[in-house]
Amino acid sequence: PLPHPSEHLALQPGPAMALETRKRPAAAAAAAEVVTGLGAKQPKQMKAYQDHGGPVAATAMLHYSKVVPGKRVGRYIGVDDAGELVDVHEEHLVELGSARDLAPKATLDTKCFELRHFPTKLPNFQDDEDIRKFYYAEMEELIKACSGAESVMVFDHTVRNTASGRGLNVTSGEAASAVVRVHTDYSDTSGPQRVRTLAESGGYTGVKLSEEEKEEILSREFCIVNVWRNIRSGEAVQSKPLAVLDPDSLDKKDFITYEMQYKERRGENYALSFNPAHRWFFFPLMEKDECLVFKTWESRIDRPRYCFHTAFDEIGR
């Protein structure tokens, strides 16, 4: 094994909205608000990786969410704790396969995630203005290539630092810590609502939609995509890499609505209850020239729609 560094830096330049070329039928628009089952349960998690032709690559304790009777799942952000939301985790020992060994290779459409070799020309990821000015255009190109979308709009980015991150919710220019909770970033309610919010108040990076742009997006098939990159040159990620869940091992009964109560609004995403059928993967030793592209919400219901993910600590490294 390579030396274990004390930290790694990652840029999550997203999410971005990818707009598909087809108009959405009225029936699909209604059905998109329904959480759908994404595949049959597998009988045994520890044997599942062998189905993909690869051995177990890592072992970790992953943090799932737990429902507490009489409470809703979630947290308060920038407001006093009203006692209605709780964020209780359950740790479960899981084995992860190497997504590099998947055959056929994972894609956004088949697994909700894929790895692309995509070098960047941006030398400094500590300057938010340079990220918006130069890196956003690179990410638009990458996401178009992965998704086949007609247009892409990048509306957010986060720099994460495993050693000195200042929490999950930070202001512009600060580095955030890694998120060690199994989740996907949007729900069937908050995915479309994010488009409406970008038209009403915009995003913290300055992106704001017109009413016409909002209506155009909501009338089309669209998805919300994240891109995760190691931003430290010459050093592969070994501390808190990102695990991604095979959507074919999901069961909708395990979805938990996770609320985020801000002073001025309420957001939500999906947390997850533990299920031994879950099949977890990661891309070991990601280099700076590699990008993990993953879909956090999808309007189309004829394919996998959610990539549950979490940072993790590999046991024994």
Image (cartoon, rainbow, N blue to C red):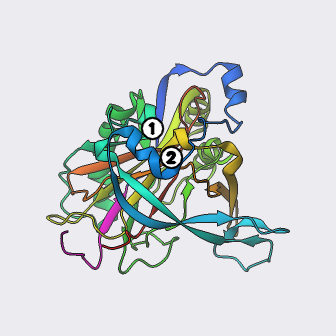
As for residue 7 lying within the magenta part, the answer is yes
As for residue 302 lying within the magenta part, the answer is no
Whether residue 72 is visible here, answered yes or no, is yes
Labels 1 & 2 near each other (Cβ < 8 A): yes
Mark 2 lies on residue? 307
Chain part drawn in magenta: 1-12
- Residue 111 placement (x, y as % from top left): 45, 38
Q: Amino acid at mark 2?
A: Cys
Q: Amino acid at mark 1?
A: Lys
Residue plotted at (14% across, 64% down): 234
Is residue 187 depicted above or below 205 in this figure? above
Mark 1 lies on residue? 111
Whether residue 15 is visible here, answered yes or no, is no
Q: Quadrant of the N terminus?
A: bottom left
- Residue 292 placement (x, y as % from top left): 34, 49
Secondary element at tag 1: helix
Question: Is the residue marked by circle 2 packed among few (<14), some (14-19), or many (20+) residues within 10 Å?
Answer: many
